[in-house]
Image (cartoon, rainbow, N blue to C red):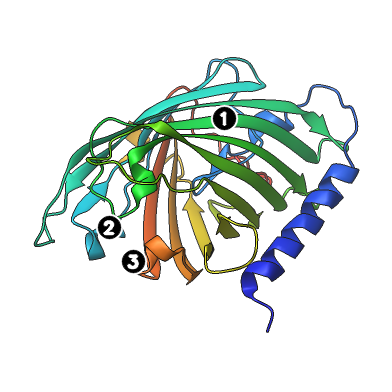
Amino acid sequence: MIKPSKILISAFSCALLCSASSLRAGENSPFGTDFIQTFSGTELPFTQNNSELNIEIRPKIGDLLDEPFIRLPIELEYGFTPKLEGSIGVIPFLENPFHGDRASSDGYFTFGLKQRIDALENDRLAVSVGLNGRLPLDTIPSDWQRDQYDSYTPFFVAAYEIDKSGEWTVFSNVAYELLDKDNNQMPYLIEAPNSLARFTTGFIHHPPGDLRYGLRFLYITEDFDGGTNDGLKIIPSITWYPPDDTWFFRSIAGHFELTLDVEYAMEKLPEQAEESDIGINFKVRWNLLRKNERAKEAVIR
């Protein structure tokens, strides 16, 4: 029987090759600045507008169910140019008041840089490369040994708008998490875990209105052999853009996006064996310098 992870790799590879085969030089285009920059934690090729500043908060609501802590990622994103975006942030671990064995930590310092290539293929294809870093500031209360290590993740991502109306976009992301085995918060010396490759593919549907829908598949592997050291998740997502006259948001300057996604683990890495198959994440994205300009036509903002 063919494993789901192998099917996903094959589908992902085909999608990526199709995107790569259609690359060509293009003129500077608003394509890369009018679209969302991330999708439920997955990097997309689109970047901030010049001098645009965002605050993104992504509480891990699923931690309330089975973890002694609650992770609260907070990130600042800034557009240095229309094609270059940088970010810094923290991920504190707060005590879970609903868990018997409460734990907390200073968590991580995070940073990132993303360079967009000009919009291609008649402004319907976008490509970016970048690097994300995560540095533990304290011992992390996690069963994952790799969580204790400094990590650096280069990535390549492509997205293609499959219809001219802008309602449907497909994307593929390849990332490789490199662990700095000499810098970690491990309380004792052990053999360092392997680095991880992450492959993500999916689509976003954005019809006219204030809602956006998406689905992505995340495949994680250490060995590239489709064996036990692999993980596979399916993640549906929904985003709401509060209209200008929405209670509470109408009195706050800026542009808001509220996203809820649900993770279902079809396969797990060995160190994830005791974790729940279901994860729930909620994200609040606040663009401080942009008014709530949700377009009437169907485009991803």
Q: Above or below — where is 202 with respect to 52?
A: below
Q: Residue at x 58, y 68 (%)?
A: 227
Of mark 1 and mark 2, the one earlier in the sequence is 2
Task: Answer left or right for 262 relative to 217.
Answer: left
What amino acid type should be assigned to the residue bearing mark 3?
A: Glu
Pointer 2: residues within 10 angstroms few (<14), some, or many (20+)? some
Measure the alpha-carbon separation of dots 3 and 1: 28 Å
For residue 44, say whether it is visible. yes
Label 2 element class: helix
Q: CA distance from mark 2 to mark 3?
A: 10 Å
Residue to which mark 3 is pinned: 275
Image mark for residue 63: 2
Amino acid, disc 2: Asp
Is there a contact, CB below 8 Å, between mark 3 and mark 1? Answer: no
- Place of residue 275 in the rendered image (x, y in percent of width and height, measured from the top left): 33, 66
The C terminus lies in quadrant:
top right
Asked if the residues shown at circle 1 and circle 2 are in contact, with their CB atoms under 8 angstroms apart, the answer is no
Could you say whether the residue bearing mark 1 is in a helix, strand or loop? Answer: strand
Q: Residue furthest bottom?
A: 1
Question: Which tag is nearer the camera, tag 2 or tag 3?
Answer: 3
Marks 2,3: beta carbons within 8 A: no
Residue 131 circle label: 1
Q: Mark 2 or 3 closer to N-term? A: 2
* Image quadrant assignment for residue 273: bottom left
Q: Is residue 214 something one can see in this rendering? A: no
SS state under label 3: loop
Q: Amino acid at mark 1?
A: Leu
Residue mark closest to the camera, 1 vs 2: 1
Give the residue displayed 68% in from the left and 45% down from the top: 297
Residue drawn at x 79%, y 40% is 125
Query: Label 1, label 2: how many angstroms apart (C-alpha)?
Result: 27 Å
